[in-house]
Image (cartoon, rainbow, N blue to C red):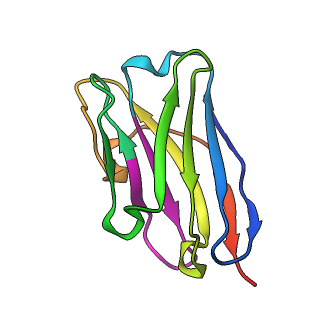
Amino acid sequence: QLVESGGGLVQPGGSLRLSCAASGFTLDYYAIGWFRQAPGKEREGVSCIASSDGRTYYADFVKGRFSISKDNARNTVYLQMNSLKPEDTAVYYCAAQPPPLYASLNYKDYDLWGQGTQVTVSS
């Protein structure tokens, strides 16, 4: 099971940190992705962390603003979001997939999903 938290309402330019806590399995060996979906739009990949070596990947539209990290002791993955823009408004989901998946920003590659957390960027 994956449970996201940390969403909310923030002004443009502000920051939020999303958490994705896993239970029932260990995230160590899984590829983990953060995705988002705005109303009327397809789900899109934001960032992911590779299963075997922890390498991180970002969508172009968040590079330099968002940062993904993993705390193995807490079995939790984080998404630090800085310099937020109104267009970042969406429901954010985390997802996990065991090997052989290494890493992917394609939501279709993941089977295990959290329930999502709403992020709203507005003044």
Q: Residue at x 47, y 22 (%)?
A: 27
**Image height check: is 83 above or below 92?**
below
Q: Residue at x 59, y 68 (%)?
A: 90
Q: Is residue 115 visible?
A: no
Question: In the image shown, does 98 or 111 lie closer to the viewer?
Answer: 98
Is-magenta flag for residue 40?
yes
Residue occupying the far bottom of the picture? 123
Question: In the image shown, does 81 or 44 lie closer to the viewer?
Answer: 81
Q: Residue at x 58, y 57 (%)?
A: 92
- Is 121 placed left or right of 103 in the picture? right
User: Where in the figure is residue 100, as x and y percent of width and height?
Assistant: 22, 25
- Is 114 placed left or right of 58 in the picture? right
For the C terminus, the image quarter is: bottom right
Q: Which residues are magenta?
A: 32-47
**Image height check: is 43 above or below 38?**
above
Question: In the image shown, does 103 or 80 lie closer to the viewer?
Answer: 80
For the N terminus, the image quarter is: top right
Residue 62 location, quadrant = bottom left
Q: Is residue 30 visible?
A: yes
Magenta span dominant secondary structure: strand
Residue 83 location, quadrant = bottom right
| Numbered circles on residues, count | 0
User: Where in the figure is residue 38, as x and y percent of width and height?
Assistant: 55, 73
**Image height check: is 59 above or below 107?**
below
Q: Residue at x 48, y 56 (%)?
A: 66
**Image height check: is 111 above or below 37?**
above
Is-magenta flag for residue 64?
no
- Is 13 placed left or right of 103 in the picture? right
